[in-house]
Amino acid sequence: MSTTVDVPYRLEFTVEVPGTLEQVWQAIATAKGMSAWFLPTELEEREGGSLHFSMGPELGSDGEVVRWDPPHRIVYQEDWAALMGKDPDALSPLTSEFVVEATSGGTCVVRVTSSGFGRGDDWEQEWWDTLGPGWMPFFDNLRVYLAHFAGQEATRFEASASRTGDADALWSTMRTELGIGDEGTTVTARGTTGTVERLGERQALVRLTQPVPGILDVYVWAGDDGASIVGLRASLFSADAADYVQREEPGWRAWLQGITVPA
């Protein structure tokens, strides 16, 4: 099999977010900031620094910062082949660049580019086809973080369960039980209150206000074997957030385990 690495892949998009250059830089280029709206992150904040995104138990992505120009530009690389269980030496690294520019209206524009080279295998194109839809919703989290929680450190909480049934039907059940309506509507469920900030395909973003403020993602991921993953992940911002997670986590996990498609 040829090992020539010459098939280009590229993803580009631009988002406008509230905040100053310094606030946006803190959010996109520090471990504390990225952990608050993206994934739990370890980051050495310098050129040549190491990078790690935690995606779950024993699952993560390692990388390196290859350009560091605060507060305007950060570029880092990851082994996207290794994420898929492939030989990382067979492909070029995944290179992601964030460029921040301030506007006159008190916001910043963030230009995001991810690129890499492969061999043209089917799995590569499938991986890139899912990169944008899986990554871009996080930037709504970034907007909410900068608008309401800029500079604050998050207490993270995540829970999921594998459930049998059609993914759309499971999502309908979750929306009904949580009272998730249209964007801008109020959610009151399981002792929490918040506002729907984004409603996507089997996914919702809720800005929590009570009993602890934060950002809550609710989702259903369709599986290939007749089972789907139902889950939620939250970034919470208050002094008592850790106590809330310890107290309420078992209940949320039990609730996810009980999600079923109505007969």
Image: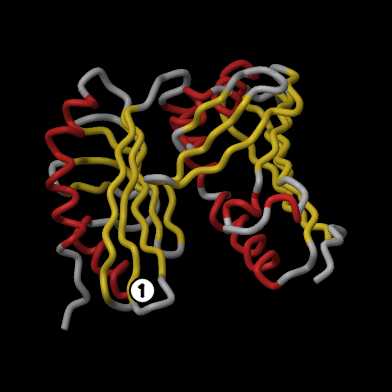
* Residue 100 in view of the camera: no
Counting every numbered tag in the picture gives 1
**Could you tell whether 17 is left or right of 88 in the image?**
left
Estimate how packed mark 1 is, as few (under 14), some (14 to 19) or many (20 or more) residues with alpha carbons within 10 Å: some
Does 186 appear above or below 145?
below
Which corner quadrant holds the N terminus?
bottom right
Residue pointed to by mark 1: 168
Image location (x, y in percent) of residue 241: 24, 26
Tell which of 16 and 228 is nearer to you.
Answer: 228
Does 233 appear above or below 68?
below
Tell which of 60 and 106 is nearer to you.
Answer: 60
Disc 1 residue type (three-letter): Asp
Q: Residue at x 83, y 58 (%)?
A: 8
Which corner quadrant holds the C terminus?
bottom left
The colouring scheme, among rainbow, by chain, secondary structure or one colour, is: secondary structure
Does 201 appear above or below 114?
below
Image quadrant in which you'd find residue 62? top right
**Could you tell whether 212 is left or right of 49 in the image?**
left
Q: Residue at x 67, y 31 (%)?
A: 64
Which SS class for mark 1? Answer: helix
* Residue 209 in view of the camera: yes
Q: Residue at x 37, y 26 (%)?
A: 154
Image quadrant in which you'd find residue 199? bottom left
Image location (x, y in percent) of residue 23: 56, 19
Image location (x, y in percent) of residue 203: 40, 58
